[in-house]
Amino acid sequence: MKKVLWLFLLIMSISTAGCADEVRKLPMDLSGGAPVDAKYAPDVMVYEDPTIRVERSKVKSAEWKCTYYTAEITIADPSQLRTLPAGDTFLSRTTVPATNLAKRVNAVLAINGDYCTVTNTTKANSYILRQGKIYRDSVQSGLDVLLVDENGNFHILPYDQAKDSDLTQCEGKNVVNAFQFGPGLVIDGTPVPDEYILDRSHSPTYANPHQREMRMCIGQIDELHYIVVSCAFHGINLTDLRDLVLSLAPVKNLYVLDGGNSAQMIFLGTKLNNVSEGNQNIRAITDIIYFASAYFKD
C-alpha cells in the first residue's frame, strides 16, 4: 500500500511541480537525467527523490550457490527508463566502461544492455530500436525480443512471433526501446518452460543457458515498477535465474541481457557486482539501460 501511495504522489508531482524545483518529463533523445546530489557509500542501500526510488541489496546465497545483486526501481514517468550507446549511435562499435556511461547521463542505476552492435557472432542481425529510433530493422533468428512501450510496459515476443510483427507498435502503444538477447524467462506472468529456456537456439551462442555463468536480467513487476538482478561469483544457469527472481518478486515479464564480465550494475556511479578486492573489473561495453531522476533543482 505504501508503494502505491508513493507512486501516486510521484505522478501528482509531475503535474503540480513549482517553479523553484522542477519535475520534468525527460526528452526522447540521448541526453541524460537530472543531476543527483547523493554519493555512493557501501551502506547506502536506497536512493529516493520526488521522481524515483531505487533500493538495492546483495545476497550471498547458499541455496543458489552464488552471490546475487538486486535493485528494485520505481519511477514517476516512463521517460526515466532510458538507454545510451557508448558511441554516437547504437550502431557504433565504440566501447566505454559502464561506470563512465552511467556518470555521463547522471544515472541513478544503470545496467549493461544487450551488446547490440556486435557484428561477428549470431547477434549480428539483432533488432535495435532505442529512444524511439530504429537503428537496425532485421530480427535475429531464434532470439526473443523485449519491447518497452511509451508507458514503460514490457512485452516479450518469442522469435516466431517477432519475425512477423511490427516491432514499433505493441498493443496500440509506440515502442521506445527494444532489445534482442534473451531468452524471456517470464512472459505475461507465466514462467517460460525449462525446455524453451535451455534450447540454445533461443540464446546467443556464447550465453550457455545450461551452465553457471554471470548473468544480468531485467523484469517488470507493475506499472513503472521494475527489478534488475545480477548473479556474480559462481554464476547461475538460466532456469535457476528465473526461479531466483520469481522468489524475490512477482514479475510479469523477465528478460535476460548480456552476461559474463559484461553483466554490470552501477549504483550512483559505482559498480556493485563482480567486484574483487582492489580490482573493479569494469569492462568497456557498447550500451547501457538506466534509470534517471527527473527532479531538477533550482
Image: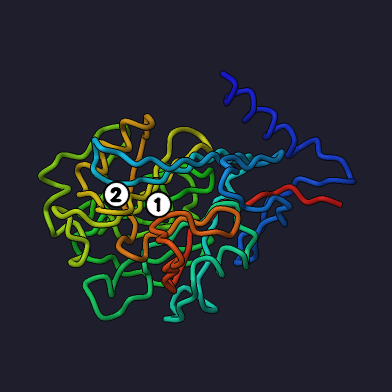
Mark before the other along the chain sequence, 2 or 1: 1
User: Residue at (70%, 40%) from the top-left corner?
Assistant: 49
Count of labels in the image = 2
Identify the residue at horizontal 53%, vertical 65% (top origin). Answer: 99
Q: The residue under label 1 is which amino acid type?
A: Leu
Picture coordinates of residue 92, whole percent (x, y): 45, 80
According to the image, label 1 marks what residue? 147
Amino acid type, mark 2: Leu
CA neighbours of label 1 inside 10 A, class few (<14), some (14 to 19), many (20+): many
Which of 137/123 is in front? 123
Q: Is residue 96 above or below residue 146?
A: below
* Front residue of this view, candidates 170 and 20: 20
Describe the element under mark 1 as helix, strand or loop. strand
Label drawn at residue 277:
none
Q: Position of residue 27 (x, y in %)?
A: 66, 58
Between 237 and 297, the residue placed more toward the observer is 237
Circle 2 SS class? strand
Decide: few, some or many residues near mark 2? Use Cα within 10 Å; few <14, some 14-19, many ≥20: many
Left or right, residue 291 beside residue 90: right
Left or right: where 198 falls relative to 133: left
* 3D distance between C-alphas at marks 2 and 1: 8 Å
**Residue at the image point whose x is 33% and y is 37% from the top:** 245
List x then y, in percent, for residue 54: 57, 41
Name the residue beneath numbered marker 2. 157
| Vertical arrangement, residue 63 with respect to residue 263, above or below | above
State if disc 1 and disc 2 touch (CB < 8 Å): yes
Q: Is residue 106 above or below residue 236?
A: below
Farthest residue to the front: give it. Answer: 277
Residue 199 coordinates in the image, percent (x, y): 11, 53
Q: Picture quarter containing residue 239? A: top left
Q: Quadrant of the N terminus?
A: top right
